[in-house]
Amino acid sequence: MSEQLRRVAIDPVTRVEGHGKITLLLDEDNHVKEARLHIVEFRGFEKFIQGRPYWEVPYFVQRLCGICPVSHHLAAAKAVDQLVGVDQLTPTSEKLRRLLHFGQTLQSHALHFFHLSSPDLLFGFGSNLKHRNIVGVIEDFPDLALKGVRLRKYGQQVIEVISGKRVHGAATVPGGMNKSLTIEERDRLLAGIDDVLAWSADAVALNEKVHMEHPENHGFGRLYSNYLSMVDKDGALELYHGGLRARKPDGSTIFDQFDYRSYYNKIREEVRSWSYMKFPYLTELGRDDGWYRVGPLARVNNCDFIFTPLAEAARQRFVAFGNGGNVHDTLAYHWARMIEALHCAESIRDLLHDPDILGSDLVTKGEKREEGIGVIEAPRGTLFHHYKVSEDGTIKKANLIVSTTSNNQAMNESVRSVANEYLDGNEITEGLLNHLEVAVRAYDPCLSCATHALGKMPLQVELIDASGALVDKLTKGSDGKIERDHN
Amino acid sequence: MARLNVTTTKPILIFAYGNPGRGDDALGPLLLEAMEQHQPPLAECQTDMQLQVEHVTDLEGRALILFVDADVSCAAPFAFAALRAKKDDSYTSHAMTPHALLHAFRQVYGKDAPPAFLLRIRGYDFELGEPLSPPATANLAAAVELVKSLVSTADISDWQQLGA
């Protein structure tokens, strides 16, 4: 492949002219031997944060992502807790942070399923693009779409109540929280929670139905992968704080209850010349076999149970579908995602009934340290924030492993799998492009999250033969128009 | 089905969106900050990083809506025009266009969205961590003056005249 082609392939996803790009590399027999999904993410952020005071970090990192700013805020806040020598928050602060995180995860999962994925699942992967979108869902399934809108809105209300603002609020402080809930705020959220529970349960039921009624989708982009997630001390699903658990495809344990503050002993990041994004792998399994998946599918597969009853019942049906073992279907990400949304709704209800969230003991203090590592389960997967500070309290080193980075190899493998199944000859068809998008979307990667993209994400797919020559190129423009560029 | 809390006390909604940490993408949020200091009696200010479908709930009950966004394609200092509801073909992004949001409003509420306008402020540099570029700063100042003028009246004919 020419250097020029390599350079074009990693053009950054920018705000207006950005695009997702997939390069399919063929072998001598015209099989797809490798797929390269080009994503640029958080470019320069780790350098940008250097020299900033540590207490500002949870606020800066909210600007990384338009969908999950709260996840970055909380991961950074956990790291900052350690920098101020705090390992255990007060009950009020810990529960408020959990409430915030459940609200964030609920709204993000609702967005992902109802906005991004339900059009594919309800209308079919090959259906008319002009209708396969959230507006099409509103037209054909108005009740379902309204539930999605209101679920997301409710999650955002939780965030707003705790953070004080819809965007870039001031929820956390080093070692605690900025404020607790008032009785009025709690009651306002309680007023809507029963509907939210019902809508979440409906979303789980819909996903079960869609997945089970379409066995042809089970193998779509399926990967027999390792899985990484946090679990609590009893092995339950845990989104805010716990130990790391990694399992092999057959469910056997690689490590369990591992303290995430030593994550670098278990995870390494490989750099590849064609991508700005790193490729993490589990050290014990090595570069070739150590790649893993994170996110809802990993979490629901990895946990032993869920401590809220409705979500646990849903998990058991999920496990039964997998005959007691891991479910590897890539499209089951959506199903697992809605199980988690239901868990979030149940957890929000439980926390709203907990008097601790009204408490006034908000901040814990300790002895300052030079290093802090915060990890949470963000909506798309395990999120690592690692900071080292100088004596003056400014950041001297930062390392972030975001969920999309952890799923990097898996997304490429899913794309390769789908391309091999749907590539016919040496021509990229619109159908192939659609199917590739569906595979990528299951992981919900952050493509251009940090800047809004006017609702448009052009996608380009290139086909490169064994000699390195460009065989075909198809681009779906920002207006949905398909253009072919034969070499 | 529970109703969500929507404040509809002021007839004009200014909805500015963009990422304040991405250079000139902050034009919308910064315009909103300026307007909040101005405290327009007829307008309520709201912001978010991106437009999403749930924002239809923010539009209900308004007399006029002003969306504000950074843009790299319009002429400096800004472009101001009326918006029409339009279905958006794109479905892979995390964000919606304002015209698609108006279309979604019609689908959700069974009626047309309130009259809406889009103010696009010319931006140039959208890199993470960068401040507002000097030319964008000048464009923002001009846009703020326009919006001050707009929100002094909730009369659509005045807006249409300015947007013509």
Image: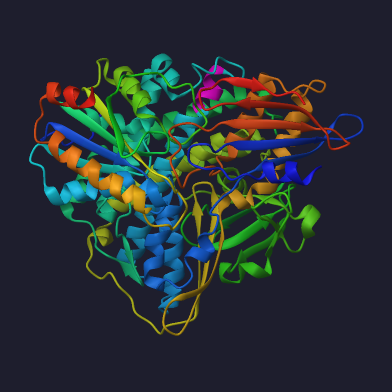
Q: Say whether residue A21 is magenta.
A: no
Residue A81: image quadrant is: bottom left
Q: Residue at x 78, y 57 (%)?
A: A287
Residue B61 appearing in the image:
no
Q: Say whether residue A121 is magenta.
A: yes
Residue A434 appearing in the image:
yes
Residue A346: image quadrant is: top left
Residue A79 placement (x, y as % from top left) = 46, 69
- Principal secondary structure, stretch drawn in magenta: helix
Q: For this view, does A180 lie left or right of residue A18?
A: left
Q: For this view, does B65 lie left or right of residue A115?
A: left
Q: Residue at x 76, y 35 (%)?
A: A24
Q: For this view, does B48 lie left or right of residue A282?
A: left
In this rendering, the answer to whether A86 lies above or below B42 is below
Q: For this view, does B8 lie left or right of residue A233?
A: left
Magenta highlight range: A118-123
Q: Quadrant of the C terminus of chain A?
A: top right
In this rendering, the answer to whether A194 lies above or below A245 is above
